[in-house]
Amino acid sequence: MKNFQLKAKILAQTRIKDNYWRCELSAPQIAKNALAGQFINIRVNDGLDPLLRRPLSIHGARGSKIKIFYKVVGKATEILAQKKVGEMLDILGPLGSGFTYPQPAARRSPPPILVAGGMGVAPLIFLAEKLRGVKTTVLIGAKTKGQLLCAWEFKKSGCAVKIATDDGSSGFKGRVSDLLKNLLSASGPSSQPIYACGPKPMLRAVADIANVCGIPAQLSLEEHMSCGIGACLGCVVRTKDGLKRVCKEGPVFLAKDLIW
Amino acid sequence: MQTKFSVEIGKLKLNNPVLAASGTFGYAEEFKDFMDLRKLGAIVTKTLTLKPRQGNPAPRTCETPAGLLNSIGLENPGLEIFIQDKLPFLKKIGIPIIMSIASEEESLEFLELVSRINLIKEVVAVELNISCPNVQGRSNLISQDAESTYKIVQEVRKITDKVLITKLSPNVTSIGAIAEAAEKAGSDAVALINTLGGMSIDVEQRKPKVAAGIAGLSGPAIRPVAVRMVWEVFNKVKIPIIGMGGIMDVSSALEFIIAGATAVSIGTANFINPKISAEIVSGLKEYLTRNKIADIQDLTGSLKICSQR
């Protein structure tokens, strides 16, 4: 797949709540080619602080536009959140391998389960959009009800949404991986493919469940990246087939291939 | 006015003085979508060893003020797989390929590697990476000792006609003395600097941010150190210098050339702007024209020293 470097104009920049922002960019070549699970690498300014680009999942793509969804966690995202509509961002994309999902013509396969923890909703919204028309179930995990993200957007894409919060303030009380376990044991032997994105401990728990049940699971990993294009070898993970670059062979990996 | 933009590194003639630095450009294929690779003067490959190397545990990199710490640990597929999988693409580009090599077993491996590289006609030069700070179990780098540097360069020199470049470490007291040893032993050029030893700590966890603990610092943070070292080496040796260390733009590339570098390598900046090398090439040309300099080699070491009052 071809990658592009372009100056993308900010078309919309909205604070969703607290530190969470959604940004829409004009990026025709990236929008046209993007797969759910791929990411862009953003240079937030021309200076030396921050020095490196920051990778962010593609949250949606339609026509000539792409969306990103981010949380302000440090200097780079702080600068990003201060950008106004009309300003330009230097971006690379669409990077990485993305999820493998059935094309609209061949959707006879069992309905998928999406598992999102925290900011893990970012790429999964895009996937849900791509899976529109399939009876997708989404499990969203958050610490509290107040920190739940994108539940409404998933519903809009036609997904059945189930919620888990650590404190029980909404939905199932406990971890989203336990909610997944309950769901799978209630439904009996299943071959519903799993797609997950979230913090590492959550992904590991999801991988364990999927591997025990023999269900194919695709996990989108997050790692610190220096280049995002496969050159620096900084973001490697261990797999059964040796070290793999999260930015190039990933960020999506099969649960059965990963060594934790 | 016709400006001369080509430079010579030993018998190797480069169309322009801008190189992609080892370890920051993969095996070039990673950059093909972002720039016309033929615009580069040469490509220096990620360092290769005889056998595949897994490298160091993650996290392997971390950003620091105006810098980047890395401890990749020379992960590479080994010579055989490089020849099979990576070399064909590099050959197709049609610009000089410089192979960076390192040894896990001192001179024996270097000699074995070089004797194999002798047979690859598209590889025009070999860069001896005797300055990688991230190889476990080696407390002293070859390039931290003039005598060891002399010995290894001389041994390799005996068995190859390829252009020989020795990559030097900044983690020394006198880099000039090491450069002299490389020159005396028959190196065609010296490349400097490799990364500067560094460390960054997560204070909440009290753990190093890069798993290996000590790592190598690159990026604009080290540039003044690198420029100073190029100047020192320029005053010690006659062989060409390939200067590097935090070059981000045309003006920082020029600093190195004025300090004494015949060519420059772009490293960390490739991660930030993957087409930066091509931009620096055209910026250098523009500088020459604007300043009516007929030959870029006239700029090398043209630093004007302030006269004493």
Image (tube, helix red, strand yellow):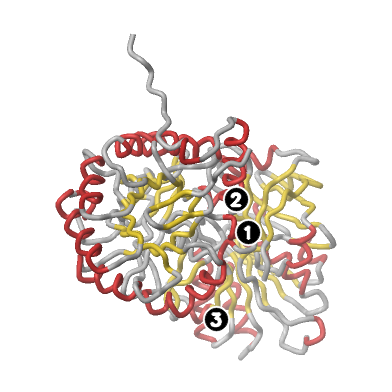
Q: Nearer the viewer, residue A23 or B146?
A: B146
Please give the chain letter of the residue carrying mark 1: B
Q: On the rendered structure, is B241 left or right of A31?
A: left
Of B285 and B195, nearer the camera is B285
Rendered location of residue B287, percent (x, y): 59, 35
Query: Image quarter for residue B302?
Result: top left
Q: Farthest residue in the right direction?
A: A63
Cβ atoms under marks 2 and 1 closer than 8 Å: yes
Q: Pinpoint residue A184: horizontal percent, then vertical percent.
A: 61, 82
Q: How crowded is the residue under tag 2: few (<14 C-alpha within 10 Å), some, or many (20+)?
A: some
Residue identified by numbered label 2? B278
Mark 2 lies on a secondary structure that is helix
Q: Residue at x 48, y 73 (%)?
A: B86
Seen in the image, is A207 located left or right of residue A156?
Answer: left
The numbered disc on residue B36 is: 1
Q: Which residue is mark 3?
A: A210
The quadrant in which the N terminus of chain A is found is bottom right
Residues under numbered marks 3 and 1 in contact, where contact means CB atoms less than 8 Å apart: no
Q: CA distance from mark 2 to mark 3?
A: 47 Å
Callout 3, which amino acid? Answer: Ala
Give the residue type at disc 2.
Ala
Image coordinates for residue A89, horizontal then vertical, percent: 70, 46
Q: Residue furthest front?
A: B1
The CA distance from mark 2 to mark 1 is 8 Å
Subunit under mark 2: B
